[in-house]
């Protein structure tokens, strides 16, 4: 039996289960409990994965409990902090940016899977984010591999082809944006002045983050971080960006044609394709790189999540076997969730499957999934540490100074001081 419940329907499910106590006792001993936050994405992919496992293990069942993401994270945090394991699931979904915070704050709470999963089969950066002291704890799931989504029809009107956007720097993109504006009158990029997305994308493309592997701030005296802020400042002063406020205004900007491009994660594909009248008018290019940083590549990440097994899980052995069998090996499974949920997994062998090889007329007949998969393999691994959100806040607080043409060295000093104060 596979069951997906939301926090609102779970009570009903428990009541119904209680109607047959005998059958519950038999099933409960083999039932996996999973926490996640999106019934149509991670919940649906987990359901598909388990249906494959259940075909070989007919006595196994699963209860997929779907929460609001923030509520689930708060619930997990509170439960782990309390030291009580009652009510915790067997498997929980964790956003990659939060993984190190959980692993370092609650040592022993999650089961190491180093000897259970062949991590060489996954994108290295996904493995890095869940590794502490040589032990890896996650089953890597969806990738936030980035791309530059752009309106190919508008750029062609200005004389640009897909080849002109291949493997370029951010400064070359600025030149393109200015030329497009001059020829079409259109603005290239929406920018949310309260979001840290662009900083994250630029930093990881250079293999750097706010912290080193030991958690020490690497903000001051970090050429890649300085280049990130300088590049952001040039983007804002080049006249090719338009300020937007919040998610709805941001996505509405480029899906309405008010702006022409956005650098973001692969998960934006579904939002863009929700406008079928724009089929054939879009393209996806590799993310630009920092031109003055040698380590910067045309690949990066934004978002993503992975599955973790709780060390206290009642069905720990079954949970690990399930994850290793399906999520760790089943290439056909990854083809199905790519087609049905738009989920780009991080199992590298999945790239050879039929769905990943297919072209997409919406994006001009390009093999977009194959391209994203190739960029996925090139993402530099970084250690997100446990204070990424605090560092993001320090950067966002300085965006007015950056966009106002402030001195970048002085701004970096302000960010560094705030981060050190908040992470003491």
Image (cartoon, rainbow, N blue to C red):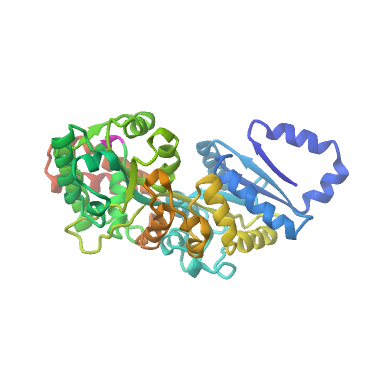
Q: Is 350 positioned to the left or the right of 10 in the image?
A: left
User: Which portion, as a residue range, is magenta?
Assistant: 190-194
User: Outermost residue, right direction?
Assistant: 22
The secondary structure that dominates the magenta segment is loop
- Could you tell me residue 399's position as x and y percent? 22, 38
Counting the numbered discs, the total is 0
- Could you tell me residue 338's position as x and y percent? 52, 51
Against 7, is 395 above or below?
Answer: below
Q: Is 42 positioned to the left or the right of 246 in the image?
A: right
Q: Residue at x 20, y 34 (%)?
A: 400
Against 44, is 316 above or below?
Answer: below
Q: Residue at x 45, y 41 (%)?
A: 270
Q: Is 371 positioned to the left or the right of 185 in the image?
A: right
- Could you tell me residue 414's position as x and y percent? 20, 44
Residue 264 appears in view:
yes
The quadrant in which residue 30 appears is bottom right
- Could you tell me residue 10's position as x and y percent? 69, 35
Q: Residue at x 57, y 67 (%)?
A: 117
Residue 413 appears in view:
no
Q: Nearer the viewer, residue 185 or 391?
A: 185
* Magenta-colored stretch includes residue 13: no
């Amino acid at each position: 039996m596979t069951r997906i419940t939301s926090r609102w329907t779970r009570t009903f499910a428990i009541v119904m289960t209680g109607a047959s106590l005998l059958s519950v006792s038999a099933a409960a001993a083999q039932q996996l409990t999973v926490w996640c936050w999106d019934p149509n994405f991670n919940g649906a992919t987990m359901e598909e994965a388990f249906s494959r496992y259940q075909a070989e293990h007919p006595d196994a069942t699963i209860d997929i409990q779907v929460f609001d993401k923030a509520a689930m994270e708060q619930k997990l945090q509170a439960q782990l902090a309390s030291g009580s394991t009652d009510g915790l699931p067997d498997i929980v979904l964790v956003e990659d940016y939060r993984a190190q915070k959980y692993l370092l704050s609650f040592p022993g709470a999650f089961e190491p899977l180093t000897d259970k999963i062949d991590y060489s089969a996954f994108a290295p950066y996904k493995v890095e984010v869940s590794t502490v002291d040589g032990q890896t704890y996650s089953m890597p799931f969806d990738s936030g591999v980035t791309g530059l989504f752009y309106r190919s029809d508008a750029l062609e009107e200005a004389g640009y082809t897909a080849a002109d956007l291949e493997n370029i720097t951010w400064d070359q993109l600025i030149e393109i944006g200015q030329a497009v504006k001059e020829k079409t009158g259109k603005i290239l990029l929406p920018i949310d002045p309260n979001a840290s997305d662009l900083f994250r994308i630029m930093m990881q493309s250079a293999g750097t983050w706010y912290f080193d592997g030991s958690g020490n701030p690497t903000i001051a005296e970090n050429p890649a971080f300085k280049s990130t802020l300088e590049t952001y400042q040039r983007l804002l002063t080049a006249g090719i960006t338009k300020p937007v406020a919040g998610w709805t205004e941001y996505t509405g900007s480029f899906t309405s044609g008010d702006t022409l491009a956005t650098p973001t994660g692969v998960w934006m594909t579904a939002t863009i394709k929700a406008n079928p009248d724009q089929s054939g008018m879009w393209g996806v290019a590799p993310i630009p790189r920092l031109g003055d940083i040698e380590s910067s590549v045309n690949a990066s990440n934004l978002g993503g999540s992975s599955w973790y097994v709780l060390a206290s899980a009642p069905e720990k052995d079954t949970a690990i076997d399930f994850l290793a069998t399906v999520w760790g090996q089943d290439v056909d499974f990854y083809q199905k969730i790519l087609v049905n949920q738009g989920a780009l997994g991080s199992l590298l062998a999945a790239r050879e499957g039929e769905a990943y090889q297919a072209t997409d007329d919406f994006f001009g007949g390009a093999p977009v999934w194959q391209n994203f998969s190739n960029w996925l393999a090139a993402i530099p691994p970084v250690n997100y540490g446990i204070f990424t959100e605090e560092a993001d806040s320090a950067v966002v607080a300085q965006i007015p100074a950056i966009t106002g043409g402030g001195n970048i060295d002085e701004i970096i000093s302000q960010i560094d001081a705030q981060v050190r104060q908040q992470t003491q």
